[in-house]
């Protein structure tokens, strides 16, 4: 496979990676960010995955649901910024969508796991990494149990992986606690972190390899 060309964003456009263990509230936080008035709005990249949709998820909005063959074709042709197997399924970030949004001057939000975040950071060194943590491990496990979207084996796997993922928070630029019932406060804190980073690096251009 040929080396991909280097893609460059507009001055000041920021790539933000949001990670955290399953059940910590990443989707709800991102929805709260999207609801906050901002000009221009953030660009939210829809992740590709080989897992089946959960009840209520909308293809092309929640995720791009792909067959394993279609997913690996994108990966093998360099169309994914990162691709990792998490909880038994493949997830990946469309590279050109990220590059186009940054080039158009948008701040881009990616919701990806700790493995994917490490890969993206290696390819976009100036990306801002934000890790979401629960108020306690027990609170996280209670959230996972209450959402009832996994069977017993899947729930056990996600609980095991949560402890491993939480141990990686030191790899991130900022760590934010998502207190139970405080989604708006969490979203406001993340937005303040993003704005602070933009003020510090207003002329920086994100380079994607």
Image (cartoon, helix red, strand yellow):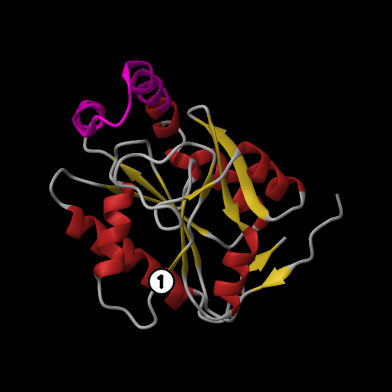
Res 164 → quadrant? top left
Q: Position of residue 50 (x, y in %)?
A: 54, 39
The C terminus lies in which quarter of the figure? bottom right
Q: Position of residue 5 (x, y in %)?
A: 79, 65
Identify the residue at horizontal 29%, vertical 64% (top origin): 33
Viewer-closest of 29 and 127? 29
Identify the residue at horizontal 35%, vertical 18% (top origin): 156
Identify the residue at horizontal 49%, vertical 61% (top origin): 45
Q: Position of residue 62 (x, y in %)?
A: 39, 52
- Vertically, is 57 above or below 88? below
Number of marks drawn: 1
Residue, far right? 2
Q: Which stretch appears magenta?
A: 138-161
Residue 152 included in the magenta stretch of the image: yes
Identify the residue at horizontal 32%, vertical 17% (top origin): 152
SS type, badge 1? loop
42 displayed left or right of 177: right
Secondary structure that dominates the magenta span: helix
- Vertically, is 145 above or below 99? above
Viewer-closest of 199 and 75? 75
23 displayed left or right of 143: right
Q: Which residue is mark 1?
A: 42
Dot 1 alpha-carbon crowd within 10 angstroms: few under 14, some 14 to 19, many 20 or more: some
Q: Position of residue 153 (x, y in %)?
A: 37, 16
Viewer-closest of 186 and 47? 47
Residue 38 included in the magenta stretch of the image: no
């Amino acid at each position: 496979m040929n080396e991909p060309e280097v893609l460059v964003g507009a001055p000041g456009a920021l790539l933000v990676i949001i990670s955290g263990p399953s059940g910590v509230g990443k989707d709800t936080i991102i929805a709260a960010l999207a609801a906050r008035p901002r000009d221009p709005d953030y660009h939210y990249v829809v992740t590709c995955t080989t897992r089946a949709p959960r009840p209520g998820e909308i293809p092309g909005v929640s995720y791009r649901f792909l067959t394993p063959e279609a997913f690996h074709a994108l990966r093998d042709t360099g169309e994914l910024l990162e691709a990792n197997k998490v909880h038994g399924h493949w997830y990946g970030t469309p590279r050109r969508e990220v590059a186009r949004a940054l080039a158009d001057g948008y701040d881009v939000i990616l919701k990806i796991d700790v493995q994917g975040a490490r890969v993206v950071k290696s390819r976009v060194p100036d990306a801002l990494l934000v890790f979401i943590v629960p108020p306690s491990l027990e609170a996280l496990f209670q959230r996972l149990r209450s959402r009832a979207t996994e069977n017993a084996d899947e729930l056990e796997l996600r609980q095991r992986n949560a402890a491993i993922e939480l141990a990686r928070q030191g790899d991130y630029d900022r760590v934010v606690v998502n207190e139970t019932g405080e989604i708006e406060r969490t979203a406001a804190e993340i937005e303040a972190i993003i704005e602070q980073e933009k003020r510090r690096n207003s002329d920086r251009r994100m380079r994607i390899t």
